[in-house]
């Protein structure tokens, strides 16, 4: 099966349909919870706790960062030791509640990204998602440059941060031009940027689409195994067992 990619415009419209009371009936909280759960399962699949428990979660100010906060909560229950870098917090009250949940679990929030990265076994890149438009601003330009050069494996949420959804990595010489994470999890549907993704593993997450919404956007729903919220696909989008 070949998985169709979906443009940034259609991805935004699809999210709107999912939150339409008559079409999808989902709340933002629900979608973020399902996305974060999917991310946490992808982490467990590629990097079980036996490979190292120190997970650094880099979060941006939008929904992609919220997905990272949710993932961190699940990871601590799986036996990991997540640490969160969240320099520009989202203004929505939802993000504050996600922070409270992590504080109540004693998950540390740090401001020194380079030092935290040195002691991490895996980095979750939850900075920018499908709505990203450049240019990069600090502190994220520096953070992405460090992600680009680190030997710590990186799992990117929906998009490698700094990449444009339609055109992939930024031009040569800009932060992120050579950034390719080892793992990518596409949420709801793969985006056109996957054609530039040459990392080792690619997952699709979001086991909640209805047949009617999938049909509207020309998406063929994959068969998710068992109770998993993720399914692995190859870099070209074809189904992978």
Image (cartoon, rainbow, N blue to C red):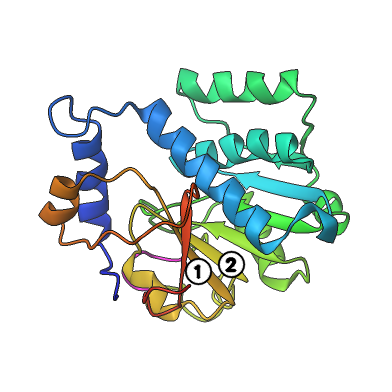
Left or right side of 37 for 30? left
Left or right side of 83 for 236? left
Q: Label 2: which residue? A: 183
Looking at the picture, tell me which residue is in the foreground, 170 or 108: 108
Residue 60: where, in percent of width, then height?
A: 55, 43
**Residue 68, placed above or below residue 172:** above
Is residue 73 visible in the rendered structure shown here?
yes
Element type at marker 1? Answer: strand
Looking at the picture, tell me which residue is in the foreground, 215 or 62: 215
**The N terminus lies in quadrant:** bottom left
User: Residue 6 lies in magenta, yes or no?
Assistant: no
Q: Quadrant of residue 133?
A: bottom left
**What is the crowding at mark 1: few (fewer than 14 residues within 10 Å), some, or many (at least 20)?**
many
Residue 78: where, in percent of width, then height?
A: 72, 40
Number of marks drawn: 2
User: Residue 166 lies in magenta, yes or no?
Assistant: yes
**Residue 145, placed above or below residue 25:** below
Picture residue at 54% right of the left edge, 52% below the top: 137
Picture residue at 24% right of the left edge, 37% below the top: 18
Residue 42: where, in percent of width, then height?
A: 58, 56
Gap between marks 1 and 2 measured at Cα: 6 Å
């Amino acid at each position: 099966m070949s998985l169709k990619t979906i443009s940034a415009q259609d991805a935004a419209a699809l999210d709107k349909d999912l939150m339409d009371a008559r079409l999808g009936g989902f709340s933002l909280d629900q979608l973020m919870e399902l996305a974060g759960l999917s991310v946490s399962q992808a982490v467990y699949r590629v990097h079980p706790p036996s490979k190292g428990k120190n997970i650094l979660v880099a979060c941006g100010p939008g929904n992609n960062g919220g997905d990272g906060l949710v993932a961190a909560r699940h990871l601590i229950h799986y036996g990991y030791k997540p640490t969160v870098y969240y320099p520009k917090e989202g203004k929505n009250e939802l993000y504050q509640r996600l922070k409270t949940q992590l504080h109540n679990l004693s998950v540390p929030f740090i401001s020194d990204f380079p030092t935290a990265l040195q002691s991490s076994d895996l980095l979750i890149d939850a900075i920018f998602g499908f709505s990203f438009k450049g240019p990069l601003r600090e502190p994220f330009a520096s953070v992405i440059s460090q992600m680009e050069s680190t030997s710590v494996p990186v799992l990117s949420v929906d998009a490698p941060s700094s990449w444009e959804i339609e055109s992939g990595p930024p031009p040569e010489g800009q932060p992120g031009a050579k950034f390719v994470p080892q793992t990518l999890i596409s949420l709801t549907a793969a985006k056109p940027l996957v054609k530039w993704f040459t990392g080792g593993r690619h997952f699709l997450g979001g086991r909640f689409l209805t047949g009617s919404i999938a049909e509207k956007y020309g998406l063929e729903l994959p068969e998710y195994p068992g109770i998993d919220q993720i399914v692995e696909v190859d870099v070209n989008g074809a189904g992978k067992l």
